[in-house]
Amino acid sequence: MIDAAELVDNEFLRQFELKTETHFAKIEYSLQERKIFLTKLIIPEGIEDENFTADFLKLVLEHIKEGDSLSVVPTSPRNC
């Protein structure tokens, strides 16, 4: 399912978005100095793929790594 989706960094809303044909997942973030705080993970109900969350997080972390060499700080458990 994640292969057909595109990761978007919505800088205005400060969130990474992943849209599939039927679902919309997001990770909200906050930037401070050279750190990005991942503050809220929202995975919609109904996603049957066991690896969706891990794959989504991997995409986000790869995107951050390709960018401005920020330090990642996770700050919140999964929220639905």
Image (cartoon, rainbow, N blue to C red):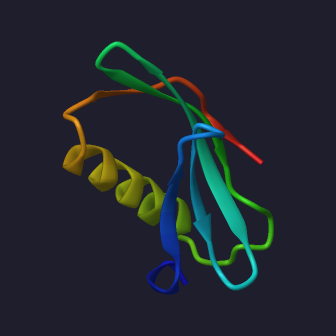
Q: Is residue 65 left or right of residue 76?
A: left
The answer to which image quadrant residue 17 occupies is: bottom right
The one of 67 and 44 positioned closer to us in this rendering = 67
| In the depicted structure, whether residue 3 falls above or below residue 46 | below
**Image position, residue 10 (x, y; %):** 57, 49
Tell which residue pokes out farthest to the top in this image.
Answer: 33
**Image position, residue 70 (x, y; %):** 26, 29
Which residue is pictured at 40% across the width and 52% down the height? 60
Q: Quadrant of the N terminus?
A: bottom right
Q: Is residue 33 left or right of residue 41?
A: left
| In the depicted structure, whether residue 3 falls above or below residue 62 | below
Tell which residue pokes out farthest to the front in this image.
Answer: 12
| In the depicted structure, whether residue 72 falls above or below residue 44 | above
| In the depicted structure, whether residue 4 falls above or below residue 70 | below
Which residue is pictured at 61% across the width and 40% down the height? 12
Which residue is pictured at 63% across the width and 52% down the height? 26
**Image position, residue 80 (x, y; %):** 77, 48
**Image position, residue 18 (x, y; %):** 58, 65
The one of 20 and 12 positioned closer to us in this rendering = 12
In this figure, what is the number of numbered marks? 0
